[in-house]
Image (cartoon, rainbow, N blue to C red):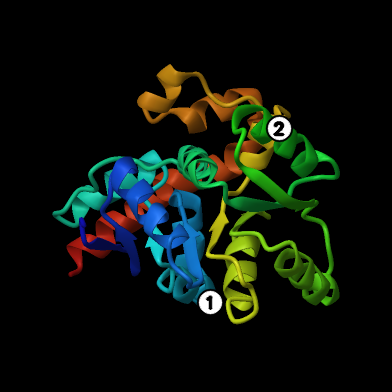
Amino acid sequence: MGGNIEIVGIKIDNVNMDEAADRLTEYLDSDTYNMVFTPNSEILYTAVKDRELERILNCGRLVAPDGIGVVIASRFYGTPVKERVAGFDLMIRLMGIADSRGSSVYLLGGKEGVAEEAAIKLTESYGNLRIAGTRNGFFEEDSEDKIINEINNSNADILIAALGAPKQEKFIYKHSDKLKVKIAMGVGGSLDVLAGRIKRAPEFYQKAGLEWFYRLMKEPGRIIRVLRIPKFIALAFYDAKSR
């Protein structure tokens, strides 16, 4: 179903949103642990310098192309991705799939209260989705075993990890031999959006691939992060030409 494209050393699944959702359905019907990542330009740019993150992303069961920079970069390698698969939208599709099955989700991440607020929004939208548990994303490494036990004891089918990159990817991979969920998905700041603490870009900006510009207008301090997009595109261009 689509195969994959290697962009700056990371294998990205060439799937559209419906195909990605079909895979998530398969994972929920399985008895295995499936890591789902949705890297954007910034994460891929970081992975070029962070070999551990590069290795982790390449171990993902589903690595979806998030961000206009990834879409542009894929064209340099001769096989453009079918479409951008935004992490937030994929998470919402997963919640719909879980709702249809009466599955349960554990929300991990955000500041104090964010996960709880996101859980309320989910229960308002999905009557059959069960919230197994919530926890904020601020914890020390020595607390991780306790958190893993909490997640496992909740009998959650899905772990939504909103810890920011690369912390969430490394957390999901580090505990892959302990976590009993069927899907562990890194979602960045998606819980903040779901909770209503951050407003997502209007649909026009989303369709035009300009969510980054909208966020920059709202948060000028993001300029350093935004500048990584053209840096990543240039890096991908030279990487593709060198092959």
Nearest the camera: 23 or 232?
23
**Label whose residue precedes the other's in the sequence (1 or 2):** 1
Q: Which mark is residue 229?
A: none
Secondary structure beneath dot 1 equals helix
Measured along the vertical axis of the image, is residue 173 above or below residue 224?
below
Which residue type carries mark 1?
Answer: Glu
The numbered dot on residue 195 is: 2
Dots 1 and 2: beta carbons under 8 Å?
Answer: no
Query: Looking at the image, which residue is at 33% across and 60% down?
Result: 12
Whole-percent x and y of residue 89? Answer: 47, 37
Q: Position of residue 8 (x, y in %)?
A: 34, 64
Mark whose residue sits in front, 1 or 2: 2
Q: Residue furthest left?
A: 78
Distance in Å between CA atoms under marks 1 and 2: 31 Å
What residue is shown at x 16% (from left), y 53% (from top)?
Answer: 79
Q: Quadrant of residue 193?
A: top right
For the C terminus, which image quadrant?
Answer: bottom left
User: What amino acid is at disc 2?
Assistant: Ala
Q: Which residue is mark 1?
A: 52
Name the quarter where the N terminus is drawn.
Answer: bottom left
